Each structure stands twice: as structure tokens, then as C-alpha cells.
């Protein structure tokens, strides 16, 4: 099976070796071949370092026709009004579903880091979750596993260490396995 990831700097493993990024670790556990289209600073509304938003990543994913698409909600959308985020996430996911009607779409909640989580982060997750579920996708709610655990993030208090990436991969893999067992 093939898989693709849509995400931000956490999804590409910013600050750790590329082979330790959680999407690749998850793909390896399921025997999937992964294309990771994540981009630092990107979101549904936020332009990444290469000026792409998640809708641009959707275009890249559509070109490779994967069996599984993992979509990470992101802290990078923290400054977007909720209505704007809802519109952008819904449009991107509807376009993804229309182009890949048989793909399994898996959404993953937004992460903040080791510092106190702003109130907008759960709103981002709920907004993206609604968009993912509206196209028949499934959702992985991670909560905030790094809050109060600076040892799991780099000195920037945001990006997971190798251990933090492995923790994410374990939690996401367990949720995916449980979801696949239901199917």
C-alpha cells in the first residue's frame, strides 16, 4: 500500500533525522510506502517556508494516488479565524476526497509543544476533525502529550525529539490499527 502525509514541520521531523519523523514510522509499521509532503510553517491557512498551504499539498498527494492519506491539523493555523480555517480545511478535504474516492483519509489532531496550550489549539483540532469526518475519514485525537514534558521536545519547546516522534508514531499507529480492525 502507498501512503501520503499532509502536514507541517512536526510531520517532516524538523530537528531530527528524516527517518525518525512520525509519518514515516507509522508507514513502516503498516508496511506502507510513504510520500511526506509536509512543509515547515504550513497549514490550511498558513503559508509554509516554500509558500505552500495544505491545499498545495493536497495537489501533490492527488498526483501520487495513495491508498492512505494522513492529514495533520497544525498549530500554524492558530491565527486564522475559525470560519476561515473551516472553509479552507473543508474545501481541501472535499477536493482530496473527490480525486481519491477510495483512499483512507486519517486526520490527526494539532500539537502545541511543552508549554501551556492556547485555547485555539483544540478549536483547530475540532474544526479539522469535522472536515475530515465530513469526507468519511477517521480521526486520531492525540491530546497534548508534550505539555509539561520538555524532554520530549527540542529546545524550541515545539518540535519533538526522536523520543517524542516515536511517542506520536506509537499513539497514531495504535489508533489506526484499532480503526482498521473495525473495518
Image (tube, grey):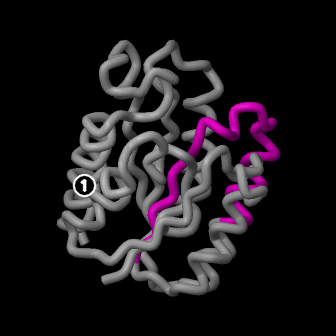
Residue 24, given in percent of the width and then of the height, sits at 33, 61
- Residue 87 counted in the magenta span: yes
Eyeballing the image, is 169 above or below 103?
above
- Would you say 130 lies left or right of 4 here? right
Task: Name above or below for residue 167 compared with residue 177.
Answer: above
Q: Mark 1 sits on what residue?
A: 173
Range of the magenta residues? 68-92
Q: Position of residue 141 (x, y in %)?
A: 39, 41
Is 44 positioned to the left or the right of 21 in the image? right
The residue at the point 58 percent across, 51 percent down is 130
Quarter-of-image position of residue 83? top right
Residue 86 is inside the magenta segment: yes
Pinpoint residue 12: horizontal percent, then vertical percent. 48, 53
Assign a secondary structure to mark 1. Answer: helix
Of the pair 183 and 125, the residue shown nearer to us: 125
Q: For the C terminus, which image quadrant?
A: bottom left
Amino acid at each position: 500500500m502507498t501512503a501520503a502525509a499532509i502536514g507541517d514541520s512536526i510531520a517532516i521531523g524538523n530537528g531530527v533525522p528524516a527517518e525518525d519523523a512520525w509519518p514515516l514510522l507509522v508507514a513502516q509499521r503498516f508496511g506502507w510506502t510513504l510520500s511526506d509532503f509536509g512543509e515547515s510553517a504550513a497549514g490550511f491557512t498558513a503559508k509554509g517556508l516554500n509558500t505552500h498551504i495544505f491545499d498545495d499539498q493536497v495537489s501533490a498527494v492527488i498526483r501520487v494516488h495513495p491508498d492512505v492519506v494522513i492529514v495533520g491539523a497544525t498549530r500554524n493555523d492558530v491565527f486564522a479565524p475559525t470560519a476561515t480555517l473551516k472553509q479552507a480545511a473543508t474545501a481541501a478535504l472535499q477536493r482530496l476526497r473527490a480525486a481519491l474516492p477510495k483512499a483512507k483519509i486519517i486526520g490527526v489532531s494539532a500539537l502545541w509543544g511543552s508549554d501551556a496550550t492556547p485555547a485555539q489549539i483544540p478549536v483547530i483540532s475540532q474544526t479539522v476533525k469535522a472536515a475530515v469526518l465530513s469526507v468519511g475519514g477517521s480521526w486520531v485525537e492525540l491530546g497534548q502529550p508534550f505539555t509539561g514534558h520538555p524532554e520530549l521536545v527540542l529546545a524550541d519547546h515545539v518540535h519533538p525529539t526522536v523520543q517524542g516522534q516515536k511517542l506520536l508514531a506509537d499513539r497514531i499507529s495504535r489508533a489506526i490499527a484499532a480503526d482498521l480492525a473495525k473495518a
